[in-house]
Image (tube, rainbow, N blue to C red):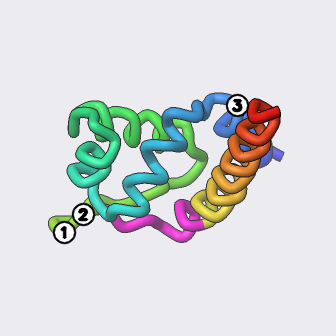
Amino acid sequence: MKAERSIDQFKRRTTLRQIEIVSMVRRTGSITAAAMALNTSIANVSRTCRRFEENSPSPVFQKTRKGVVFTEWGMSLMQEIKVLEDALIAFSENSDSLSDR
């Protein structure tokens, strides 16, 4: 029951910006590359990732010399985030078609 409660808390505390940043870290493989892709500072990406992981019930990733490696839990989160991103893209595309009317 405690694990379920922490996962629920984690999901409530997670912002869309955190999801965007962590997802970009996953796609690029590094905090530096994610910062460049998102046109923000390395410090901002690093801070956001740290807060994201602090709220998580389990470690999300490990930093290595070559970049960031996601844990099994982190990869599981990324699958859920991918579903969310796909839904947001579909929403955006539907919104665009509605504005064309």
Which secondary structure, mark 3? helix
Does residue 84 appear in this view? yes
Disc 1 is placed on an element classified as: loop
Label 1 and label 2: CA atoms lie apart by 4 Å
> Whole-Å distance between the Cαs marked 1 and 3?
32 Å
Q: Is residue 4 shown above or below 51?
A: below
Q: Is residue 87 left or right of residue 22?
A: right
| Viewer-nearest residue: 35 or 72 | 35
Disc assigned to residue 18: none
Q: Residue at x 54, y 70 (%)?
A: 72
Residue on which the image places disc 1: 66
Which amino acid, by three-letter code, is at mark 1? Lys
* Magenta stretch bounds: 68-75
Residue, x 69% and y 38% (percent of image)? 11
Identify the secondary structure beneath mark 2: strand
Q: Nearer the viewer, residue 40 or 11?
A: 40
Q: Please check the rendered image and state whether residue 79 is part of the magenta-colored stretch, yes or no.
A: no
Q: Earlier in the sequence, mark 3 or mark 2?
A: 3
**N-terminal of the two: label 1 or label 3?**
3
- Whether pointer 1 and pointer 3 mark residues with C-beta atoms closer than 8 Å, the reply is no
Question: Splitting the image into 4 quarters, where does residue 12 fall?
Answer: top right
Q: Is the Cβ of the residue at disc 1 closer than 8 Å to that at disc 2?
A: yes
Q: Which residue is mark 2?
A: 67
Residue at the limit of the structure toward the front, as seen here: 101
Q: Residue 33 in the image: state x and y as whole percent.
A: 24, 54
Query: Are there few (<14), some (14-19), or many (20+) residues within 10 Å of tag 3?
Result: few
**36 displayed left or right of 3:** left
Residue 3: x %, y % from top left: 73, 48
Q: Is residue 70 magenta?
A: yes
At label 3, the amino acid type is Arg
Residue highlighted by disc 3: 12
The residue drawn where x is 29% and y is 31% is 44
